[in-house]
Image (spheres, helix red, strand yellow):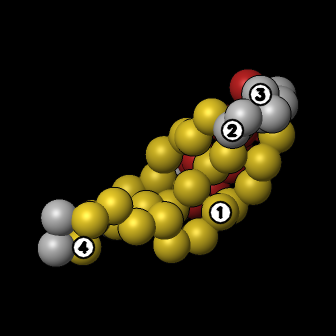
Amino acid sequence: MFVKKKRNRSGSTSAVVAETIKGYYCELVTIGVSPDVLTVDNLVRQGAGVD
């Protein structure tokens, strides 16, 4: 399981918890969405449990 940033068509960025299951990519949970880079970085850190 890992946390990653994902660009959306609208130009905003999502923080997503994802996993590879039997070779297939699966998004488990979207933590949050924001057009601001700093906000997305904070969301990724929260999802990884660093904060």
Q: Residue at x 77, y 27 (%)?
A: 11
Q: CA distance from mark 3 to mark 4?
A: 28 Å
Judged left or right of residue 21, residue 18 is right
Q: Which residue is mark 2?
A: 8
Residue 34 seen in the figure: yes
Per the rendering, the mark at residue 51 is none
Q: Amino acid at mark 3?
A: Gly
Q: Residue 9's spot in the image, x, y percent?
A: 72, 35
Could you tell me which secondary element the residue under label 3 belongs to?
Answer: loop
Per the rendering, the mark at residue 11 is 3
Q: CA distance from mark 3 to mark 2?
A: 5 Å
In terms of depth relative to the viewer, which is nearer, 26 or 45? 26
**Earlier-in-chain disc, 3 versus 1:** 3
Q: Amino acid at mark 4?
A: Ile
Q: Residue 32's spot in the image, x, y percent?
A: 75, 55
Q: Residue 35's spot in the image, x, y percent?
A: 83, 31
Q: Amino acid at mark 2?
A: Asn
